[in-house]
């Protein structure tokens, strides 16, 4: 049975790959819409890049909405040094329009009209839009079948501060709202995504597809590694956001357990830290399915096969 999904995203290089993977799986995923949020780049860039990706995939019928331009309580911090400019070189200019409705309003109205548990939310960036929707209309929590989040660093160190991963750190207060909402959550942290590395051989397989999407993804991921390798070494090859889509398509590639996850919102030293009670020592009720292992070879087989279906 097809899964109805809404993708909340801040494209961003790896976000673009995740969008393409979702659009390449129409038999399994009914992508209802894409909602942009400020994160990797300012909102004007993320919504435009979402439309660029749709154009690349030949899906200019996909509705794209713009959501929140800044976090709930903090100034916006972006990662333009990693994600900026590459889109202008490798993705087509969009001809499709941006939807006029605010992304949060679209979320509230769409979830409000849906049957309980009918829609899965895929969060590839800061959780600002989703938290705002839950604050505006708390009753929609029961309509969300699952919230699948790429974010956090539960066993390793963070990638933006020693304690925190970028998506959660940008808007920790939004993350706290989501984790306390009662919505079923699957969390895919850096601990898992660092296992999924776009090696030269895997990039060659994408180039060998011979289509524009395969070539664009290989080129984008090459830039992604170049901009991150000096700081992160081989982990600069890690492919984060597409893991969310792959987890929906082939859940057997992933493994983890139900745990309690709390978000640090007070400490300047550890702001945005995802504190996972892996061993159940606090007695707090589990509120997330925390994934920590993945079959990386199986993931890239899936990604390559599906991208080959696109133009």
Image (tube, grey):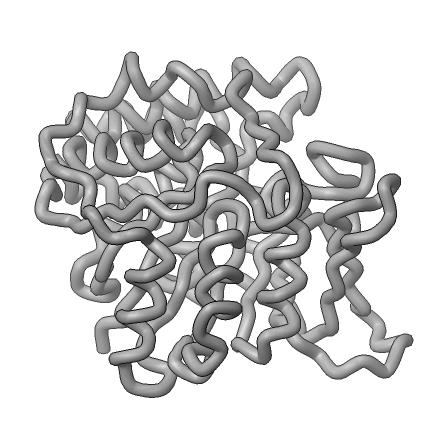
Front position in the image: 252 or 193: 193
Is 113 placed left or right of 11 in the picture? Answer: left
Is 277 placed left or right of 109 in the picture? Answer: right
Q: Quadrant of the C terminus?
A: top left
Q: Identify the residue at horizontal 53%, vertical 76% (top origin).
A: 183
Q: Quadrant of residue 158?
A: top right
Q: Quadrant of residue 105?
A: bottom left
Q: Identify the residue at horizontal 41%, vertical 45% (top origin).
A: 9
User: Where does residue 86 sit, x and y in percent of width and height?
Assistant: 37, 17
Q: Identify the residue at horizontal 62%, vertical 47% (top origin).
A: 171
User: Where does residue 38 sit, x and y in percent of width and height?
Assistant: 46, 38
Q: Quadrant of the N terminus?
A: bottom left
Is 209 placed left or right of 259 in the picture? Answer: left
Front position in the image: 117 or 25: 117
Please say whether residue 236 is visible from this viewpoint: yes
User: Where does residue 94 sit, x and y in percent of width and height?
Assistant: 16, 28
Q: Identify the residue at horizontal 58%, vertical 79% (top origin).
A: 182
Please say whether residue 293 is visible from this viewpoint: no
Front position in the image: 148 or 212: 148
Q: Quadrant of residue 251?
A: bottom left
């Amino acid at each position: 049975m097809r899964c109805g999904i809404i993708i909340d995203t801040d494209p961003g290089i790896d976000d673009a790959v995740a969008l393409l993977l979702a659009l390449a799986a129409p038999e399994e995923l009914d992508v209802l819409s894409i909602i942009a949020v400020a994160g990797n780049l300012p909102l004007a860039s993320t919504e435009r890049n979402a439309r660029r990706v749709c154009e690349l995939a030949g899906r200019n019928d996909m509705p794209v909405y713009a959501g929140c331009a800044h976090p709930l309580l903090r100034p916006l911090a972006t990662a333009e040094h990693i994600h900026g400019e590459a889109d202008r070189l490798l993705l087509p200019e969009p001809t499709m329009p941006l939807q006029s409705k605010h992304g949060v309003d679209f979320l509230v109205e769409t979830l409000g009209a849906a049957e309980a548990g009918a829609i899965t939310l895929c969060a590839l960036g800061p959780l600002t839009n989703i938290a705002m929707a839950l604050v505006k209309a708390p009753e929609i929590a029961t309509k969300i079948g699952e919230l699948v989040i790429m974010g956090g660093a539960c066993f390793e160190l963070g990638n933006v501060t020693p304690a925190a991963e970028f998506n959660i750190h940008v808007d920790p207060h939004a993350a706290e709202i989501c984790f306390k909402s009662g919505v079923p959550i699957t969390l895919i942290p850096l601990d898992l995504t660092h296992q999924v590395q776009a090696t030269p051989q895997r990039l060659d397989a994408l180039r060998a597809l011979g289509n524009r999407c395969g070539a664009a993804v290989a080129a984008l991921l090459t830039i992604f590694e170049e901009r991150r390798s000096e700081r992160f070494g081989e982990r600069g090859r890690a492919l984060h956001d597409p893991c969310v889509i792959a987890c929906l398509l082939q859940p057997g590639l992933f493994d983890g357990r139900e745990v309690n996850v709390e978000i640090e919102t007070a400490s300047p030293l550890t702001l945005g830290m995802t504190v996972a009670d892996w061993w159940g020592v606090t007695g707090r009720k589990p509120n997330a399915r925390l994934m920590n292992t993945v079959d990386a070879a199986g993931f890239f087989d899936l990604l390559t096969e599906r991208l080959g279906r696109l133009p």
